[in-house]
Image (tube, rainbow, N blue to C red):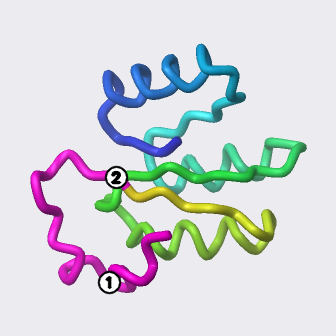
Amino acid sequence: MVEDYSDLRGLIGEILGEAGYQVLLAEGDLRALEVARMHRHKIRVLITDIRMARMACPELGRRLEIEHPGLRIIFMSGDPYPGLGSVPGASRPNLR
């Protein structure tokens, strides 16, 4: 789960953990790549903020999918309407 706001990252991690999921937390896109490299098991789902500081979120998903084929991606945003057209590589068909 990738989110730059620590309170939100912690809350979502806690909710998913209590629901029985093993959750890896990262405060940004580069840290998410590091955490994924250190994790020995397959990562099945990436939950990420649609607006990342260093790379567009579709790029983070593409990089992680190389090591974790079949990775499912959930984009989220705290913006009322994040304007997908302004995020390079993001469009409605990419949201599965």
Question: On the image, which quarter does residue 66 sit in?
Answer: bottom right
Q: CA distance from mark 1 to mark 2?
A: 15 Å
Residue 5: x %, y % from top left = 30, 34
Residue 61: x %, y % from top left = 57, 68
Q: Which residue is mark 1?
A: 88
Magenta stretch prevailing secondary structure: loop
**Which residue is found at the position 71% from the left and 28% from the top?**
22
Image mark count: 2
**Which residue is found at the position 75% from the left and 50% from the top?**
43
Figure check: 44 above or below 54: above
Query: Mark 2 Cα within 10 Å, few/some/many (few <14, many 20+)?
Result: some
Three-letter amino acid code at the position of disc 2: Met
**Element marked by disc 2:** strand
Three-letter amino acid code at the position of disc 1: Pro
Q: Which residue occupies the extreme left position in the image?
A: 80
Q: Which residue is mark 2?
A: 76
Figure check: 54 above or below 79: below
Residue 27: x %, y % from top left = 44, 39
Residue bounds of the magenta highlight: 76-96
